[in-house]
Image: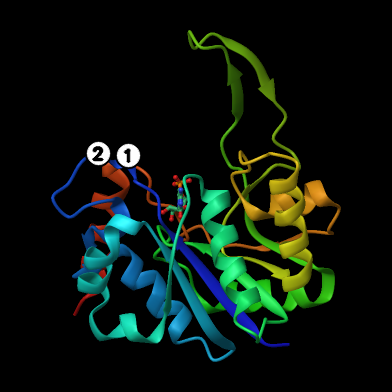
């Protein structure tokens, strides 16, 4: 099966606060932009033939500066107002390319610590089952609370996992699921596995990595910078 990857980087990153460097995927950590770290892990993976990077229409110059000559090795596509719509633009690009892949991996560009072993597990399970999600068991006790932070209930943690990316799918199955979701007027799905599940595609969990965190807040970005600095000689 041929494998393509879509990296979504068209968000505005508002929860991370404003920075002169732009949205969080363009912030410099460990000497280069968050999305450049994520992209490098996909570019260096031997199975991945095509990479689509979905960016905001306003961020083209920012992106070209962040990636340098690497920008020429990816297909830049303009995203949409919601994550789901940005992914769909990437899928449509691959569909229109004339050489649609067998398997597509969909990754949040704000996860710069993805590793090849996780990518390998996702590809293998996506081929075998249709859809695959890297996940880690939830370690914290989970509370559901009302808007005034009164605890309404404690959710039993057994069987609960945190879903990460990249998520992998048979290309035709995830395209069909996205088309159906869009056709039903829904654009509120927060990951692609939930769209596949909703459409009836089998999705299995594979072992994720505790380090494969999603950078959301200002603190996450500072912690990522520290972590990458420690790695330097
Ligand atoms: O906002 P959130 O942290 O859930 O975003 C996850 C990923 O989806 C980020 O990499 C972000 O850039 C991307 N995204 C996108 N288009 C949007 C919203 C988010 O590509 N409209």
Residue 202 at x, y = what percent?
84, 59
Callout 2: CB less than 8 Å from ligand 1: no
Q: Residues within 10 Å of mark 1 (few under 14, many from 20)?
A: few
For residue 149, above or below residue 192: above
Q: Is mark 1 within 8 Å of ligand 1?
A: no
Q: Which residue is mark 2?
A: 17
Q: Nearer the viewer, residue 205 or 76?
A: 76
SS label for mark 1 = helix
The residues bearing labels 1 and 2 have C-alpha atoms spaced at a distance of 5 Å
- In this picture, is 158 found above or below 91? above
Q: Nearer the viewer, residue 31 or 100?
A: 100
- Residue at x 23%, y 70% (from the top left corner): 66
Label placed on residue 212: none
**Dots 1, 2 in contact, CB < 8 A:** yes
Residue farthest to the bottom, as pictured: 46
Measuring from the top left, give residue 111's x and y in whole percent: 43, 60
* Residue at the (32%, 47%) spot, across then down: 220
Q: Secondary structure at mark 2?
A: loop
The residue where tag 1 is placed is 14
Q: Quadrant of the C terminus?
A: bottom left
x, y (%) of residue 78?
Answer: 43, 62
6 sits to left or right of 63: right
Q: Nearer the viewer, residue 38 or 198?
A: 198
Q: In terms of depth relative to the viewer, which is nearer, 142 or 70?
A: 70
Q: Residue visible at 65% across and 85% down?
A: 98
Q: How is the image coloured?
A: rainbow
Residue 210 percent across, percent down from the top left: 51, 57
| Residue at x-position 17% and y-position 55% | 21
Would residue 163 be visible to someone looking at this image? Answer: yes
Number of numbered discs on residues: 2
The N terminus appears in which quarter of the rendering? Answer: bottom right
């Amino acid at each position: 099966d041929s494998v393509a990857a879509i990296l979504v980087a068209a968000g505005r990153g508002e929860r991370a606060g404003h920075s002169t460097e732009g949205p969080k995927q363009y912030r410099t950590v460990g000497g280069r932009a968050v999305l450049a770290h994520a992209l490098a892990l996909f570019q260096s993976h031997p199975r991945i033939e095509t990479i689509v990077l979905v960016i905001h229409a306003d961020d083209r110059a920012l992106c070209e500066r962040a990636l340098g000559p690497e920008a020429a090795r990816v297909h830049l596509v303009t995203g949409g107002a919601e994550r789901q719509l940005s992914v769909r633009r990437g899928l449509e690009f691959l569909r229109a390319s004339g050489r649609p892949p067998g398997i597509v991996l969909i990754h949040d560009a704000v996860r710069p610590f993805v590793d090849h072993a996780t990518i390998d597990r996702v590809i293998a399970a996506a081929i075998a089952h249709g859809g695959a999600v890297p996940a880690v068991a939830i370690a914290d006790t989970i509370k559901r609370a009302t808007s005034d932070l009164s605890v309404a209930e404690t959710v039993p943690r057994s069987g609960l996992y945190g879903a990460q990316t990249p998520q992998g799918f048979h290309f035709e199955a995830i395209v069909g699921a996205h088309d159906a979701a869009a056709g039903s007027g829904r654009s509120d799905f927060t990951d692609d596995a939930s769209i596949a599940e909703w459409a009836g595609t089998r999705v299995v969990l594979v072992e994720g990595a505790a380090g494969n965190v999603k950078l959301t807040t200002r603190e996450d970005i500072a912690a990522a910078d520290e972590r990458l600095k420690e790695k330097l000689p």
